Image (cartoon, rainbow, N blue to C red):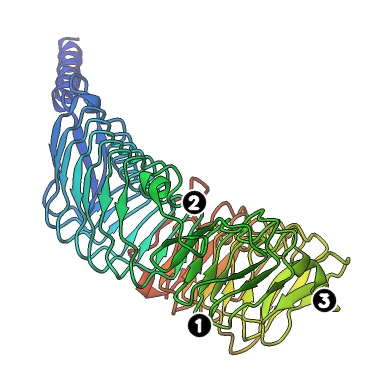
């Protein structure tokens, strides 16, 4: 009986010790690290992560994980070691008190929304290894005054600096080739920003709500230019000749100009943005230079020019080897014309009759939303030797009957939501792909396996809250 009582006492003491140990070891916040990934900061019993003011990331950490510092509202200073290579999506999102962060030279990538709504951040210098600023990276950083950009930066993604209301001046390196939608939207103080010499593509309303756009001067020919980019055309003239140096015509540049009848575009033009000439009702004559690489959504919607183009046997309208429009004719198999270079944005939007599409080897770019909401599309066949390099955002979005797709070997870039809500179980990304957006393959309900080239290892990981498919690198 005494022995049994002693056992109970010993067991009780062990339990008390365990409870005390648990309490003592969990009084303060914990840094959860798995391998070389800082996963999160976990609140303790007394110390909460919301109360942390300064934090030192341990040496050896190479990745700051998604939402790792979420809800660290009082974090003012964070110190990163030279081992950090990647800051993942929304890692510091809503750290509204963050004033200072020195990014190490080892850093290669900052992902979407990493510093979203860091409202106290004033200065930041990006390391030289970074070549892309992802979407919403600094959006909502309302006190951000100075940002030093790397000299090899090539792309600024959607809304990267949106609502940075204190940003007055930004020096963009000449290496930049692409700036996406709303990149500087509502940067109300931004008044000085030099156009990069090598820029080839800009998105919609990148300067909306900025002092720069308000103060922009209209030139004698009626154009408002930013470097080699025509942002807006203002005169009411019947005939217009665009300046020879123009590389890009921005979204909505001529939209609803009801006077223009004829436009002469220069050879060397690379891009025409979304709805650039839409609802220019009188427009009936325009040339499309062979230099054009990219065409946005509905660029000629509501124009005489588009109406007079001939419809082929499949219901398609072409101009200068660019597929501009599809007129629904109840055809379930579409063969895109040989020598077509570009499938323009929105061409097959909600073309629910289409079940099969044959794409010739000449097509280089499938533009934004080209096949969006083609709910019955089952087969996409690329001709052998396909030159396709670019699949833009939402290109095959909501093609939920698309059970498989064999992507051509020359493909280099796949943008966000390109294959959102598709029906395939397996997809193989070709070995020449250099850029695969983390959201390129998302919400595919039947997806079981993604095969990726080894060159994307460490650059791509599953980010959706959907069940994770098998990810295999070959």
Of the image marks 3 and 2, the number of the one nearer the N terminus = 2
Rounded to the nearest angstrom, the CA distance separating label 1 from label 3 is 31 Å
Rounded to the nearest angstrom, the CA distance separating label 1 from label 2 is 31 Å
Q: Is residue 68 above or below residue 21?
A: below
Check the image and name the residue furthest to the front: 220
Left or right, 354 with reference to 241 = right
Of the image marks 1 and 3, the number of the one nearer the N terminus = 3
Residue 121: image location, x then y, percent: 22, 38
Disc 3 is placed on an element classified as loop
Check contact, mark 1 vs mark 3: CB within 8 A.
Answer: no
Check the image and name the residue furthest to the right: 330
Query: Which part of the image, by quadrant, shows the N terminus?
Result: top left
Left or right, 121 with reference to 458 = left
Left or right, 204 with reference to 213 = right
Residue matched to label 1: 410
At 42% across and 49% down in the image, what residue appears? 213
Return the mark for residue 205: 2
Residue 372: image location, x then y, percent: 67, 59
Residue matched to label 3: 310
């Amino acid at each position: 009986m005494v022995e049994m009582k002693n056992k109970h006492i010993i067991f009780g003491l062990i339990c008390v010790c365990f409870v005390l140990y648990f309490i003592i070891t969990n009084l303060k916040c914990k840094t959860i690290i798995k391998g070389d990934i800082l996963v999160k900061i976990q609140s303790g019993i007394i110390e909460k992560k919301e109360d942390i003011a300064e934090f030192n990331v341990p040496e050896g950490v190479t990745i700051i994980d998604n939402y790792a510092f979420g809800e660290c509202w009082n974090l003012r200073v964070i110190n990163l070691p030279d081992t950090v290579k990647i800051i993942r999506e929304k890692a510091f999102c809503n750290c509204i008190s963050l004033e200072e962060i020195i990014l190490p030279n080892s850093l290669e990538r900052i992902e979407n929304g990493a510093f979203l709504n860091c409202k106290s951040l004033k200065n930041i210098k990006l390391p030289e290894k970074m070549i892309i600023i992802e979407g919403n990276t600094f959006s909502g950083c309302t006190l951000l005054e100075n940002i030093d950009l790397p000299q090899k930066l090539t792309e600024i993604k959607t809304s990267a600096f949106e609502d940075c209301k204190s940003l007055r001046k930004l020096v963009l390196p000449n290496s930049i080739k692409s700036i996406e939608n709303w990149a500087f939207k509502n940067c109300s103080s931004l008044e000085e920003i030099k156009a990069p010499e090598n820029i080839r593509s800009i998105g919609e309303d990148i300067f909306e709500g900025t002092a720069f756009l308000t103060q922009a001067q209209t030139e004698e020919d009626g154009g408002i230019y930013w470097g080699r980019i025509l942002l807006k055309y203002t005169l009411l003239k019947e005939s217009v000749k665009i300046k020879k140096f123009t590389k890009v015509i921005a979204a909505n540049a001529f939209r609803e100009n009801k006077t223009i009848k004829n436009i002469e575009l220069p050879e060397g033009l690379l891009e025409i943005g979304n709805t650039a000439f839409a609802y220019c009702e009188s427009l009936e004559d325009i040339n499309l230079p062979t230099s054009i690489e990219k065409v946005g959504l509905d660029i000629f919607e509501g124009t005489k020019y588009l109406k007079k183009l001939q419809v082929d046997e499949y219901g398609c309208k072409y101009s200068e080897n660019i597929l501009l429009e599809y007129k629904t004719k109840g055809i379930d198999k579409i063969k895109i014309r040989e020598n077509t270079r570009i499938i323009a944005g929105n061409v097959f939007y909600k073309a629910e009759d289409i079940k099969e599409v044959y794409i010739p080897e000449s097509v280089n770019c499938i533009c934004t939303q080209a096949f969006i909401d083609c709910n019955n599309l089952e087969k996409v066949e690329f001709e052998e030797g396909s030159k396709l390099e670019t699949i833009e955002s939402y290109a095959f979005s909501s093609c939920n009957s698309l059970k498989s797709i064999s992507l051509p070997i020359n493909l280099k870039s796949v943008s966000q939501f390109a294959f959102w809500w598709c029906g395939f179980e397996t997809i193989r990304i070709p070995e020449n792909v250099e850029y695969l957006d983390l959201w390129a393959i998302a919400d595919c309900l039947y997806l079981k396996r993604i095969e990726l080239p080894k060159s994307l290892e460490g650059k791509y990981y599953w980010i959706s809250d959907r069940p994770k498919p098998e990810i295999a690198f070959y």
